[in-house]
Amino acid sequence: MNIHIHTADKVIFYSISFMLIASIGSFIGVCIYRIPRGESIVGGRSRCPHCGGILKIQNLLPLVSYIFQKGRCCYCSEIISPFYPFIEILTAAVLLLIYTTAGFNKILLPYWFLASLLLVTAFIDLRYMYIPNGIIFTGLIGGSIMKLVLGTSGLGGIFLGIFAGAFPMLAIYLLRPGGMGAGDVKLAAVMGGILGWQHVLLALFLSFFLGAFAGIFLVLLGQKGLKDPMPFGPFLAMGRMLSMTLGGWIIPWYSSLILI
Ligand SMILES: [Zn+2]
């Protein structure tokens, strides 16, 4: 399922899609900035933190505006954080990758919804070491409604997914205090509800693998001690991205291993 660009039409189509998706990235950037500060994510225009001027960058074309204004505020010429174009490019890359593997079908919307939530969660967790409850509720309720309306899953499937996501994490949380945050357990429940039990188990496995790998790497580099806490949210996010993009190939493979 590679993207084959045969004609100029497709180039235009993908360019427009990329800009639309980067706009989602722009909103994700706003969420990452505002949610930890307790600000509304829907009301108010983004303002320059230096002069208070309303940022045109946030409201016009993402990336293009940033490049056009050379990354500076159009009022006071102070530098605007390169995090914004970074998150726009990252979001576009992640959502396009999911599209190329999941294809254009009903599951795409819940998958994009979850990917967006996880991008917000991962960056807030990395910086502030917590996962906001608002994101959890949005994911559980929004994800369930989306799946029921689109008819991709029944209520039973959603609950099974939530259980499959939350149970292993809850067990670790209770058995090994300090090893896992309560937010991680809740996030795994959200992932399970949207992904379904097969994908969420794969996502959890990949998350642990990535987390352990990064942990060993940081200890070897002398950046972390063996007992230091590490935010697990980013690894949950990455594990889930991998499960969503590569799951189509990995799940049949490991199912065949288990069933043989
Ligand atoms: Zn300014």
Image: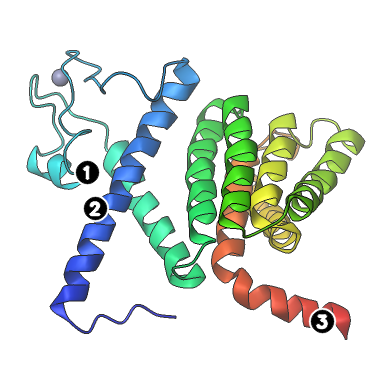
Frontmost residue, 20 versus 97: 20
Report the residue marked by disc 1: 62
Of badges 2 and 3, the one in the foreground is 2
Q: Decide: marks 2, 1 in contact (CB < 8 A)?
A: yes
Report the residue marked by disc 2: 19
Q: Residue 79: which quarter of the image? A: top left
Secondary structure found at label 3? helix
Whether the residue under disc 1 has CB within 8 Å of ligand 1: no
Report the residue marked by disc 3: 257
Residue at figure coordinates x 18%, y 26% from the top left: 55
Residue at figure coordinates x 43%, y 65% from the top left: 99
**How far apart are labels 2 and 3 at the CA level?**
41 Å
Give the class, few, some or many, for how many residues have Cα within 10 Å of label 3's Cα (few <14, many ≥20).
few
State the image coordinates of residue 233 (x, y, percent, origin top left).
62, 41
State the image coordinates of residue 215 (x, y, percent, origin top left).
66, 48
Residue at figure coordinates x 54%, y 48% from the top left: 114
**How far apart are labels 3 and 1 at the CA level?**
45 Å
Residue type, mark 1 in image: Pro
State the image coordinates of residue 170 (x, y, percent, origin top left).
84, 39
Residue at figure coordinates x 62%, y 56% from the top left: 239
Secondary structure found at label 2? helix
Whether the residue under disc 2 has CB within 8 Å of ligand 1: no
Mark 2 vs mark 1: which is more N-terminal?
2
Mark 2 vs mark 3: which is more N-terminal?
2
- Quarter holding the C terminus is bottom right
Secondary structure found at label 1? loop
Frontmost residue, 225 versus 114: 114
Figure check: 206 above or below 113: below
